[in-house]
Amino acid sequence: MFSKRHNKVSVKTIANFLKINYSGPDFSIESPNSLDNPKSNSILFYHVSKNTKHQIIKNVQYDLKKLKQFENIILLTNIDLEQIDIPFLLTEDPKLDFYRIILEFFSDNEFESGIHETAIIEKNSSIGKNVYIGSHCYIGNDVKIGDNSKIFHNTCIYGKTEIGSNSIIKSNSTIGSEGFGFINTGNDLFHLPHIGSILIGNHVWIGSNSSIEKSHIDQTIIEDHVKIDDLVQVGHNTTIKQFSQITAGCVIVGRAKIGKNCWVSPHSVIDVGCEIGDNCVIGTSSLVRSNFTNDSVIVGSPAKFLRKNV
């Protein structure tokens, strides 16, 4: 939810921002760029993973000497590059610092706080300070939204739902709807009423076209710092613990429990009631139908334990 800011910033200003000692030439940086598309007067990053044992993606090799054809380039890196004679800033996490620089110097918040005139906010809802609610949103009576959160266009939030501060829900998502629960009575499919609630923590990200179902009776819980990608379904009574990341197209079926700091790869399914421990990695398109302990790498359909994630 950011737009590009046109700016000129000196290398020494950037170094001071990162608290890095820099004694090289000072010049103006006008934009961040990638190694695939370098330009003069730009900042780039080059990261080499020093932990090859647990790499998911191999290091991409670049001929960094090609950068010498451009003027006034500075490179963020975690390796010494003095041998190729390109100005650089040495940092432990070049990618993180690169995007910190973009956030500080080369981007603007595209959506400030405010409620769009087409949004429907029921009277008994509670909206915190500096909240943004986009066009054609619906916020129900029992909904609470914490300070500095952003709810983007065409999103509906129903039921007894509490959303913490500094959280983001992207467009076309539905939070708090009835879950998919039916009993075959012989001549009908009887819908099980969902009268529980949803608790979404602070600094949570929920992607576009995602659905979070309220619980049958208790709570569906998304803890602090959880990040959920686009097109994700989270079923009733599910718990996702702190710092876990659920990527695009995943289905988390009802009553599942996902531990802290887990990574669930795209198009995976966590079946009803399955429990995943802390620090687990679930491979792409895996079908998880049993429980797994902490630090497991899980792959396949049906998913099986591959190795420890240590």
Image (cartoon, rainbow, N blue to C red):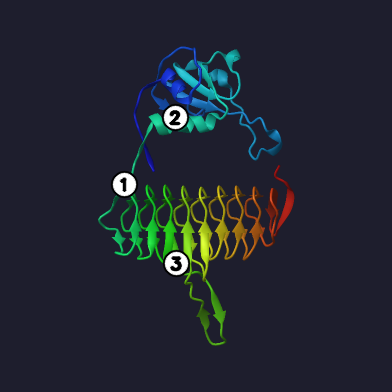
Check the image and report above or below for 68 versus 279: above
Q: Quadrant of the N terminus?
A: top left
Measured from the top left, where is residue 267 in percent x and y? Answer: 58, 55
Q: CA distance from mark 1 to mark 3?
A: 26 Å
Q: Secondary structure at mark 3?
A: strand
Labels 1, 3: front one: 1
According to the picture, the residue beneath numbered tag 2 turns out to be 101
Q: CA distance from mark 3 to mark 2?
A: 39 Å
- In the picture, measured across the screen, residue 79 lies left or right of residue 209, that is right
Q: Amino acid at mark 3?
A: Ser
Measured from the top left, where is residue 167 in percent x and y? Answer: 43, 49
User: Residue extending furthest left?
Assistant: 117
Mark 2 crowd level (few <14, some 14–19, many ≥20, 10 Å Cα): some
Measured from the top left, where is residue 156 in percent x and y? Answer: 38, 61
Mark 3 crowd level (few <14, some 14–19, many ≥20, 10 Å Cα): some
Q: Amino acid at mark 2?
A: Ile
Mark earlier in primary sequence (1, 3)? 1
According to the picture, the residue beneath numbered tag 3 turns out to be 177
- In the picture, measured across the screen, residue 48 lies left or right of residue 34, that is right
Q: Which mark is residue 198?
A: none
Mark earlier in primary sequence (2, 1)? 2
Q: Secondary structure at mark 1?
A: loop
**Pick the front one: 127 or 270:** 127
- Residue displayed at 61% across by 49% down: 262
According to the picture, the residue beneath numbered tag 1 turns out to be 113
Asked if marks 1 and 3 touch (Cβ < 8 Å), the reply is no
